[in-house]
Image (cartoon, grey):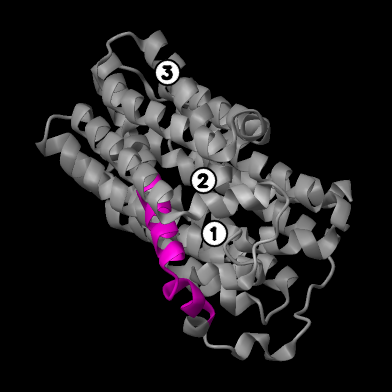
Amino acid sequence: MYKYTSLFFLIMFMIGTDTFLISPLLPTLQEKFDVSTGIAGWLIGAYTLGSAVFALIAGPLSDGWNRRTVLICGLLGFAVSTALCGFADSFWTMFLFRLLAGISAAFTAPQVWASIPAVMPPSRIARTMGVAFGGLAAAQALGVPIGSWLAEAGWSIPFWTIGVASTALAAAAFILLPDMKPSAPSAGGTSIFRRYAPLMMSGRARTGFLAYLLLHLGSGTAFAFVGRWMADQFELAVGQIGTVMMFLGFGTLIGSIISSYTVRKLGLIPAVTAGMLLLAILYAVVPRLTSLPLVAALYLIMFAVLGIIFPIAMGALTSLNASIRGTISSLANSTMNGANTLGAWIAGVLYVQYGGYSSIGLFSAVCLALSLVAFRMGGVLKSGAANAGGETASAGSLNR
């Protein structure tokens, strides 16, 4: 069973590294392709746009296919499109390859979450889910800094490295994973829109996803241009930016590890409330600081808080209806990437036209505050608290 756990961890590590890699490389790529700061932000948005749009259909469609085949094909597409980024000779070719990488990731990542219950015994499902999520956090802590250090030898090298490693993982998946064909042959024929109908008709679900959108819009907008800000504010080279980014990743990793402990000690609703209020304050304050060690320390704290909140928010959403958790997860993934896409565009506009990173910090603070209001008023956190306490959310609870 450890072979599956290791495989899923490494797949999510590669996807996470590729997802976050552009931020520290943004100053280098902006200079390479000779584009403005605002336009350069779309190299982040291209990936998240492809992932956001195709996540909406990839999850429901793949329910009727062999998950092993979908995962391997998605991983191969991810490997090729990421490697091609290293050969891009213009902004628009890089944009295209990043878009294709995001589309491939939309078909790959959901298969990891869906495959875990199929290949792992019930007693190890939750632990394996945590290990796979840890792959994303480890990508921020280790993958992104390593990619930044490799970029010092050549900006293409990180993309080629991820492409080669992902190809090796596709081969490992081909050898290790069993076939995972749908139990019901008709599953793939169900209308995609019909699968989402219960969520669209539920006020609690709509409010919950609005809160989730605002949470990622605030954090994603701030993250998109943190590399550009560090280069301008502290005159850091790309490798130095990667080193600072390591603090962000370790913060997320620490937060994900202590998330369940924090909920047990504080309670779900108090933990989210205190965490999001702290984030709103820090997002507004950090851009005004001039001490790099202090900025790095505060970002460690901020991303630890985000590492605590993200699993709680996802758990609250999936607890709305146990019978459509796969659809909820797909929509949550699309919401996250859609927010990051919009955030990259907003960050570019704010950074260039409205006062630099300070305006981005204020925007993120407002988003976090509004997200907290939506979470509290919509009642979705109550569903998560009930689920954390051992109660099972019924299908009917979604429509309250």
From the image, tell me which residue sits under label 3: 298
Sequence-first disc among 1 and 2: 2
Is label 1 in contact with label 3 (beta carbons under 8 Å)?
Answer: no
> Which amino acid type is marked by label 2?
Asp
**Percent x, y for residue 74?**
61, 65
From the viewer's side, name the closer residue of 290 and 200: 200
Residue 270 in sight: yes
View extreme (left): residue: 353
From the image, tell me which residue sits under label 2: 18
Identify the residue at horizontal 66%, vertical 53% (top origin): 387
Is label 1 in contact with label 2 (beta carbons under 8 Å)?
Answer: yes
The answer for how far apart the CA atoms under marks 3 and 2 are is 24 Å
Q: Which residues are magenta?
A: 195-215
Identify the residue at horizontal 50%, vertical 71% (top origin): 399
Quick check: is 384 in the magenta stretch? no
Q: Is residue 375 above or below residue 37?
A: below
Sequence-first disc among 3 and 2: 2
10 Å crowding of disc 2: few (<14), some (14-19), many (20+): many
Q: Is residue 236 above or below residue 83?
A: above
